[in-house]
Image: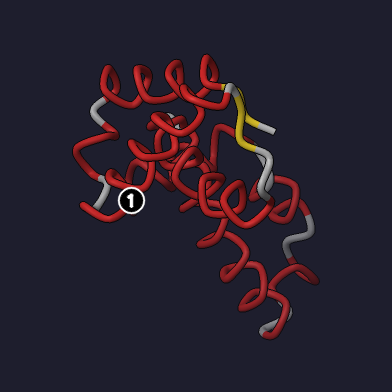
Amino acid sequence: MLTHRELVQIQRKGYRSGAWRKLNGLDKSFFRVSVLYSGLNGKIVNSRILTQLKNIIEELTSTFREKIIRVSFERTRKMIGTFEEREVFSWAPELRAWLDRPEFLFWMGVTFG
């Protein structure tokens, strides 16, 4: 369930962070209509609409740091798979712990993301 107040706060956060500009026109329109509908009825409870709104809300509320960590996490998972295939961890076991450190993930995202 999403209330009108929650949707307005999310929309405002998206405006302030600049994430609103990155949405495509269909997502913007759908979100606006959802805000208007929730203003009339007080809340949105339909599961199909909530599922579609969830993706838009995730884009509007995610921060730059979260995006960097997500991209670097995916890249690091691929690296771990490659290292396991080539048995790198057998001669460098501390490398696995190093790849899971948040500082390394942030560095990877900023540098290579």
Indicate the position of residue 64 as horizontal and vertical percent values: 38, 32
**Is 13 in front, or is 32?**
32
The secondary structure type at the circle numbered 1 is helix
Q: Is residue 28 above or below residue 63?
A: below
In the picture provided, is 106 more to the left or to the right than 13?
right
**Is 76 in front, or is 31?**
31
Q: Name the residue located 52 percent from the left edge and 54 percent from the top edge.
A: 52
In the picture provided, is 3 more to the left or to the right than 111?
right
Picture quarter containing residue 105? top right
Colouring convention used in this rendered image of the protein = secondary structure
Indicate the position of residue 112 as horizontal and vertical percent values: 33, 53
How many C-alpha atoms fall within 10 Å of the one at disc 1: few (<14), some, or many (≥20)?
Answer: some
Q: Name the residue located 44 percent from the left edge and 38 percent from the top edge.
A: 34
Q: Which residue is mark 1?
A: 27
Indicate the position of residue 37 as horizontal and vertical percent values: 46, 34
Indicate the position of residue 44 as horizontal and vertical percent values: 61, 36
Residue reaching furthest to the bottom: 85
Q: Name the residue located 48 percent from the left edge and 38 percent from the top edge.
A: 57
Q: Name the residue located 36 percent from the left edge and 40 percent from the top edge.
A: 33
**Is 29 in front, or is 94?**
29
Picture quarter containing residue 103? top right
Look at label 1 and name its amino acid. Answer: Asp
The quarter in which the N terminus is drawn is top right
Q: Looking at the image, how many numbered discs can be counted on the residues? A: 1
Picture quarter containing residue 78? bottom right
